[in-house]
Image: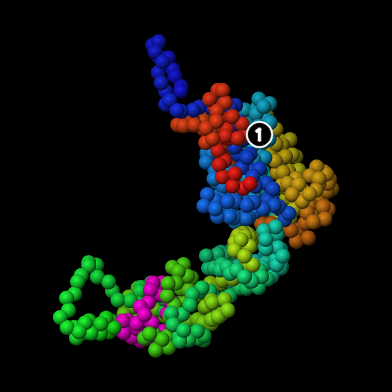
């Protein structure tokens, strides 16, 4: 409770259950929470990063080393920790990959900032120094970046392979990287200004268990995991006319409940005949358009199924709304809401084939702008992680095509930028210079963690990398499989420059946001564990960091 004396009487400012932390206590609390999040995902970084098992309150199990997935699945209720999770989500949305890098760098920035705070350097000076360093680092990344042409499929494949390595897809990375590059190429269009735009929404990903990942394939069209409504219907059609509808091929239901009183069997038969005639009229309207195939988002009446089969029309019901929208792009058809007034102009064209073993329909359009990656894996957990890895790889290849710049991976870019930032720090006046140097040290966390996760000595690795860069080897990075310092760009370890810039920018903004807070006022207990120290403020990293409740599920 906070009080202030006014005319000799205490005035209550905060409620009875409120808590407040100020200055060093607040900064220490926030930095500890943010660092805990960063450390939770640090061991997943790199080709030899480890996986996390996340168990939800419902018992659902997720096994992954994808940073943003881990952080989203964890039950985090500390407000500062949630701010760091937002860094990962922003990185995922803007660049598609590099989430672990962004979070790890944010945590390291705050760790080094804490050392500066202990030297009585004001947070404002640290924030300004971090901002200057971030701007300079992004400029140096642009200077280091190599141009890549959208038609350079070999370099794009290396970008995809680098992204997939360590994510469960690396055993078949040559095949999968080629599928990814082909998929991105299929949905890339050239804008009027000569730039390239990748429409990733036209790449559909379908998964299937029970097969090897090496049997994954790319289809120039859609995959529909449905059965025909009747076995007698045709399942293989060439240049088929396709009708898409989001309206049920069933009898219209009345808006109100009604009762019919029948006096004779003839009246009942007349009523049934009337219903049958309505269904026949709907089928006749479909047939009159010239449709060979009907994909219906809603249900299809049994009687309508019979008439469609008699007409030789393939019908598939309960197709997902997202699949209907994708089929629209694949076939060129329009989605019909009023079946009885449908015309031939609404139809699209596609080749239809059936895989009876996998119980899938393949819908392939000659000029379709949509493609489907059919990913296969032995189990549900395997295929889920494969899908996450492929999704990230698609994003980074698309980013590379649009941005046209790549960097050497394996920590090469971070060590070189850190070296240049130290030179830049000499031109910065005041205490901000120390913050710039701390920023440079933070970037070198990446090669150190890569070495640690690979079972190598991080100090020796960093010394060797610094020596190589001091000799002018700007592409010198760590080969985690041999432990040697190599030219990672020539070795095919390539990352998109935009993802690296975004990671540095997001990490800096998050760190500065945390550092700017000097007062925490909570309406309730700051610790979700309900544990307090003698002063009423949360204690150490257990309950004191404000509750990282879901981390227990990772054990």
The image shows residue 356 at horizontal and vertical percentages of 55, 80
Instruction: Residue at 70%, 57% (x, y): give it.
Output: 166
In magenta segment, residue 304: yes
The answer to whether residue 447 is seen in the rendering is no
526 or 423: which is nearer to us?
A: 526
The image shows residue 341 at horizontal and vertical percentages of 31, 79
Q: Secondary structure at mark 1?
A: helix
Instruction: Residue at 71%, 36% (x, y): give it.
Output: 437
| Rendered view: 391 above or below 282 | above
| Rendered view: 25 above or below 103 | above
Left or right of 265, for residue 287 = right
Instruction: Residue at 71%, 52% (x, y): give it.
Output: 49
The image shows residue 283 at horizontal and vertical percentages of 34, 83
Q: Residue furthest top?
A: 8
Mark 1 packing: few (<14 Cα in 10 Å), some, or many (20+)? many
Q: Would you identify the image quadrant in which residue 48 lies?
A: bottom right
**Scheme by which the image is coloured:** rainbow
186 or 429: which is nearer to us?
A: 186
383 or 147: which is nearer to us?
A: 383
Give the labeled residue for mark 1: 113
Instruction: Residue at 25%, 82% (x, y): give it.
Output: 272
Q: Which residues are magenta?
A: 279-305
């Amino acid at each position: 409770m906070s009080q202030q004396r006014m005319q000799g009487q205490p005035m209550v400012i905060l409620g009875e259950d409120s808590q407040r932390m100020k200055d060093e206590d607040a900064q220490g609390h926030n930095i500890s929470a943010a660092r805990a999040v960063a450390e939770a995902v640090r061991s997943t970084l790199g080709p030899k990063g480890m996986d996390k098992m996340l168990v939800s309150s419902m018992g659902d199990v997720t096994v992954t080393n994808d940073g943003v997935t881990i952080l989203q699945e964890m039950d985090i209720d500390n407000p500062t920790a949630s701010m760091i999770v937002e860094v990962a989500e922003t990185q995922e949305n803007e660049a598609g990959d590099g989430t672990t890098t962004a979070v790890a760098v944010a945590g390291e920035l705050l760790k080094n900032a804490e050392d500066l705070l202990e030297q009585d350097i004001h947070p404002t000076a640290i924030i300004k120094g971090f901002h200057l360093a971030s701007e300079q680092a992004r400029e140096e990344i642009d200077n280091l970046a190599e141009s890549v042409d959208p038609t350079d499929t070999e370099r794009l494949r290396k970008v995809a392979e680098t992204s997939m390595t360590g994510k469960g897809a690396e055993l078949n990375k040559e095949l999968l990287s080629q599928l990814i590059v082909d998929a991105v190429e299929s949905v890339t269009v050239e804008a009027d200004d000569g730039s390239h735009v990748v429409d990733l929404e036209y790449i559909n990903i379908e998964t299937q268990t029970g097969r090897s990942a090496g049997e994954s394939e790319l289809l120039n069209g859609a995959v529909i995991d449905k059965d025909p409504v009747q076995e007698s219907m045709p399942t293989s059609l060439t240049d088929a006319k396709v009708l898409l509808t989001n309206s049920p091929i069933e009898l219209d239901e009345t808006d109100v409940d009604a009762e019919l009183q029948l006096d004779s069997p003839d009246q009942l038969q007349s009523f049934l005949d009337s219903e049958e005639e309505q269904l026949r009229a709907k089928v006749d309207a479909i047939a009159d358009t010239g449709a060979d195939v009907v994909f219906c988002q809603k249900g299809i009446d049994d009687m309508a199924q019979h008439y469609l089969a008699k007409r030789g029309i393939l019908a598939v019901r309960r197709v997902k709304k997202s699949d209907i929208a994708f089929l629209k792009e694949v076939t060129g058809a329009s989605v019909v809401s009023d079946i009885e007034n449908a015309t031939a102009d609404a139809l699209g064209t596609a080749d239809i084939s059936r895989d009876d073993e996998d119980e899938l329909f393949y819908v392939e359009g000659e000029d379709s702008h949509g493609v489907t990656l059919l990913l296969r894996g032995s189990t549900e957990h395997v295929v889920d992680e494969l899908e996450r890895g492929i999704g990230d790889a698609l994003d980074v290849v698309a980013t590379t095509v649009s941005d046209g710049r790549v960097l050497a991976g394996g920590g090469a870019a971070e060590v070189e930028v850190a070296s240049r930032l130290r030179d830049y720090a000499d031109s910065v006046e005041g205490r901000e210079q120390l913050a710039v140097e701390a920023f440079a040290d933070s970037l070198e966390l990446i090669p150190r963690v890569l070495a640690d996760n690979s079972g190598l000595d991080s100090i020796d690795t960093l010394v060797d990398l610094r020596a190589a860069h001091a000799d002018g080897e700007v592409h010198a990075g760590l080969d985690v499989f041999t432990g040697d310092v190599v030219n990672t760009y020539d070795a095919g370890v390539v990352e998109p420059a935009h993802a690296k810039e975004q990671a540095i920018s997001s990490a800096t903004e998050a760190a500065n946001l945390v550092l700017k807070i000097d007062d925490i006022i909570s309406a309730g207990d700051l610790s979700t564990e309900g544990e307090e120290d003698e002063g009423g403020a949360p204690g150490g990293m257990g309950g004191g960091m404000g509750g990282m409740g879901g981390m227990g599920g990772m054990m």
